[in-house]
Image (cartoon, grey):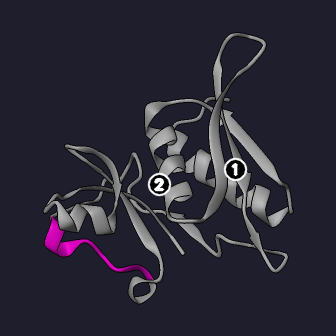
Amino acid sequence: MSVHDSIGDFITVIRNAGSAGKSTCSYPHSNLRSGIANILKERGFVEDCKESEAESGMKNIEINLKYVNGQHAIRGISRISTPGRRSYCGYREIPKVLGGLGISILSTPKGIMDDKAARQNKLGGELLCSVW
């Protein structure tokens, strides 16, 4: 079975690992997935993310999940732009998630960044996902 939406699958792995109470989850490395994981780490949704080498020689991203009072720090995470329906916006149209309590992650010409950084740099792009 091939995965047509690797970002959607990556988000689902994180969501399911948190729901199951796992402390870590891993997924094959790509620059896009690594950028998303680093933003989640910077904004405090996960404890740590690092690259690891598998026995087969492929790189993996290992994410240490964060729990607050026994509950997963990521209350919700959803994919916005899909391969069948891309969603783009300018920096003025970037949506606020839960009135600013959550974040949107975008792919911009300057790389992967969250909504706050994109607004500060006046950059729009593809809305990848939202996290709260």
Where 34 sits versus 77, above or below?
A: above
Horizontal side of residue 30 vs 126, given as left or right:
right
Quarter of the image where the C terminus is located: bottom right
Picture quadrant of residue 100: bottom left
Q: Which mark is residue 13?
A: 1
Q: Is residue 120 visible?
A: yes
Where 53 sits versus 9, above or below?
A: above
**Where residue 97 sits in the image (x, y, percent)?**
42, 79
**Point 64% across, 70% down: residue:** 74
Q: Which mark is residue 39?
A: 2
Cα–Cα span, label 2 and label 1: 17 Å
Q: Is residue 82 magenta?
A: no
**Where residue 23 sits in the image (x, y, percent)?**
83, 54
Mark 2 secondary-structure assignment:
helix
Q: Dots 2 and 1: beta carbons under 8 Å?
A: no
User: What is the count of numbered marks?
Assistant: 2
Mark 1 secondary-structure assignment:
helix
**Point 19% across, 74% down: residue:** 93
- Which residues are the magenta region? 91-97
Picture quadrant of residue 85: bottom left
**Where residue 89 sits in the image (x, y, percent)?**
20, 63
Picture quadrant of residue 113: bottom left
Horizontal side of residue 61 vs 65, given as left or right:
left
In front here: 51 or 129? 51
Circle 2: residue type:
Ile
